[in-house]
Amino acid sequence: MAKCEHKSCRNAEKVWLPYVFQGRECGLKRHPYCSECGAVKNLSSERPRKIGFYVNIVMALSKDYKIAQVQKRLIAMEIIKLDLEDNYALDRHQQEKLFLEIVRKFVNIPEVILRSQLEH
């Protein structure tokens, strides 16, 4: 799947949607969306982290838990496939939720451990 370059719609075309901060709704705001792919722009101040941050977490976990090279590769490929670094459409809360789902899909590590790694 090719990455979209995200071209925001015009001001008059913005849509009213719930504004979410730290996973909680905080009323409504006008959100621009990409006129190419339809993704709604993230208006949160919680900017997503770079992919390297999440890959480093997986590498750190592999020291304490047995994570095969194949599992690391599958996790990395899934992170890239889902475009976890898309700062147009994702905020950090959404990004962390996706990361947890990806890792739990390939590795049996308790969610509490994964969440503690995200706080560093």
Image (cartoon, rainbow, N blue to C red):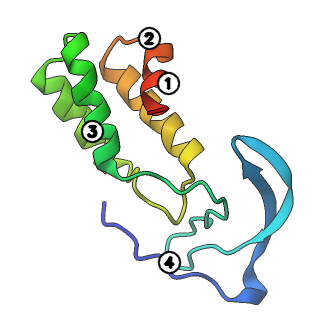
User: Circle 4 is placed at which residue position?
Assistant: 36
Check disc 3 and give the amino acid type. Answer: Val
Q: Residues within 10 Å of mark 4 (few under 14, many from 20)?
A: few
Name the mark on residue 110: 2
Q: Which badge, 2 or 3, is on the more N-terminal residue?
A: 3
Q: Which badge, 2 or 4, is on the more N-terminal residue?
A: 4
Residue 31 lies left or right of residue 52; in this view the side is: right
Check disc 1 and give the amino acid type. Answer: Arg
Observer-nearest of 107 and 54: 54
User: Circle 3 is placed at which residue position?
Assistant: 55
89 relative to 107, above or below: below
Observer-nearest of 13 and 115: 115
Distance from Cα at disc 4 to Cα at disc 1: 34 Å
Q: Quadrant of residue 27?
A: bottom right
Q: Which badge, 1 or 2, is on the more N-terminal residue?
A: 2
Helix, strand or loop for disc 4: loop
CB under 8 Å between callouts 1 and 2?
no
